[in-house]
Image (spheres, rainbow, N blue to C red):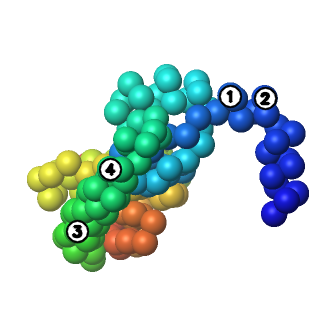
């Protein structure tokens, strides 16, 4: 414990280049809503403050900490519910995607995750975030494939993709 205090005291210059921020909304890989974290001044000035993602942690803002945490928890619960509904709609869905093939039987351009997301969006008649297909390997040959979509860190859905030859 005393070692960490000495380290912080010795890094006085580094502490002056950072500031404590109360996060108002979730920021991926940084903090969740309601958390107080130390960030660099430039990150706070140029990104967090202009976008309204965080406020400078003062005595007045820390009094609202419980309200901010509750609002963040409610927002995460809403997002989880939306993702679960999407997973239910997508699970075991079958989508057919056509593409031109070479004489050897391989696609000229592989069927990418983006094309899969777009086809699923058309099928469900709703906007599908293309990032859910980031981990999907491109399909290079016609056939039937099972594709696992990462809807969130915990929620996944499996769709069947029929890669067909364009006529």
Residue that label 2 marks? 13
First-in-chain label (4 vs 3): 4
**Quick one: label 4, few (<14), some, or many (20+) residues within 10 Å?**
few
Q: Secondary structure at mark 1?
A: loop
Query: Marks 1 and 2: CB-CB under 8 Å?
Result: yes
Question: x, y (%) of residue 134?
Answer: 47, 52
Cα distance in 3D space between marks 2 and 4: 30 Å
Q: Between marks 1 and 2, how big is the CA–CA gap?
A: 7 Å
- The residue singled out by tag 3 in the image is 81
In which quadrant is the N terminus drawn?
A: bottom right
| Front in this rendered view, residue 88 or 144 | 88
* Circle 3: element type: helix
**Which mark identifies residue 17?**
1
Contact? badges 2 and 4 (CB < 8 Å): no
Occupied quadrant, residue 20: top right
Where does the image place residue 57, in percent across and percent down from the top left?
47, 40
Q: Residue at x 40, y 63 (%)?
A: 152
Q: Circle 2: is it few (<14), some (14-19), or many (20+) Cα within 10 Å?
A: few
Q: Earlier in the sequence, mark 1 or mark 3?
A: 1
Q: Earlier in the sequence, mark 3 or mark 2?
A: 2
**Label placed on residue 64:** 4
Mark 1 vs mark 3, foreground winner is 1
Residue placed farthest to the left in the image? 125
């Amino acid at each position: 414990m005393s070692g960490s205090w000495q380290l912080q005291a010795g890094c006085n210059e580094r502490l002056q280049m950072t500031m404590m921020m109360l996060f108002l909304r979730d920021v991926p890989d940084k903090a969740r809503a309601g958390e107080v974290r130390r960030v660099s001044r430039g990150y706070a000035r140029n990104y967090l403050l202009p976008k309204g993602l965080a406020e400078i942690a003062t005595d007045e803002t820390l009094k609202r900490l419980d309200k901010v945490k509750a609002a963040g928890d409610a927002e995460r619960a809403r997002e989880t519910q939306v993702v679960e509904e999407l997973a239910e709609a997508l699970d075991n869905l079958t989508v057919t995607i056509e593409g031109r093939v070479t004489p050897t039987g391989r696609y000229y351009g592989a069927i990418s995750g983006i094309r899969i997301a777009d086809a699923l969006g058309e099928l469900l008649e709703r906007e599908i975030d293309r990032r859910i297909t980031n981990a999907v390997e491109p399909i290079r040959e016609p056939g039937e494939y099972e594709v696992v979509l990462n809807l969130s860190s915990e929620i996944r859905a499996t769709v069947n993709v029929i890669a067909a030859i364009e006529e």
